[in-house]
Amino acid sequence: MPDAKHLDSPERIADEGQRLYAEKHQTKLEKDHLGHFVAINVLTGEAYVAQFPERALEDARAAAPNGVFHLIRIGAPGAFKVSFGTVRNDGFWGRPLRHGR
């Protein structure tokens, strides 16, 4: 297991969490807990499973207050789908992020 100083970015934490999930937990969790959430402590490899993401993280933090966690929705390519829109009433989101050259 890597130590915390080697997990110095969100990308490295996510990579280690995905690796641990694939190597240690994926087969059993996808068989028994499809659609639930797992918080993986990337420092120890321990997994905390719950029906909801908040609960998985609460359980993980209670068991390992100094842990570093990666959250995965079991059986899905990612825990959450993030999207971005350009509609906001005050006009802020309607502005282009970058002007053309």
Image (spheres, rainbow, N blue to C red):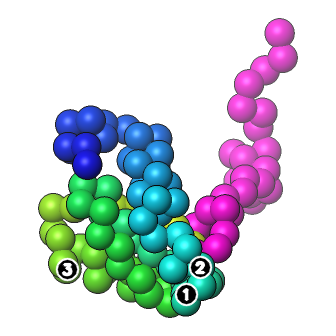
Quadrant in which the C terminus appears: top right
Residue 81, image x and y in percent?
68, 63
Check disc 3 and report the residue beneath it.
62
Secondary structure of residue under mark 2:
helix
Q: Residue at x 41, y 48 (%)?
A: 16
Which residue type does callout 1 highlight? His
Question: Viewed as shown, does residue 25 lie left or right of 48?
Answer: right
Viewer can see residue 91 = no
**Magenta region includes residue 92:** yes
Question: Viewed as shown, does residue 35 lie left or right of 3?
Answer: right
When the figure is inspected, residue 41 is found, relative to residue 43, above or below; the finding is below
Q: Which residue is drawn at 72% across and 53% down?
A: 84
Check disc 2 and report the residue beneath it.
30
Which residue type does callout 3 highlight? Ala
Check disc 1 and report the residue beneath it.
33
Q: Could you say which is closer to the camera, residue 55 or residue 29?
A: 29
When the figure is inspected, residue 55 is found, relative to residue 1, above or below; the finding is below
Which residue type does callout 2 highlight? Glu
Q: Do the residues labelled 2 and 1 touch (CB within 8 Å)?
A: yes
Q: What stretch is highlighted in magenta?
A: 74-101
**Category of crowding for the residue at label 3, using alpha-carbon neighbours closer than 10 angstroms: few (below 14), some (14–19), many (at least 20):** few
Marks 2 and 3, the one that precedes in the sequence: 2
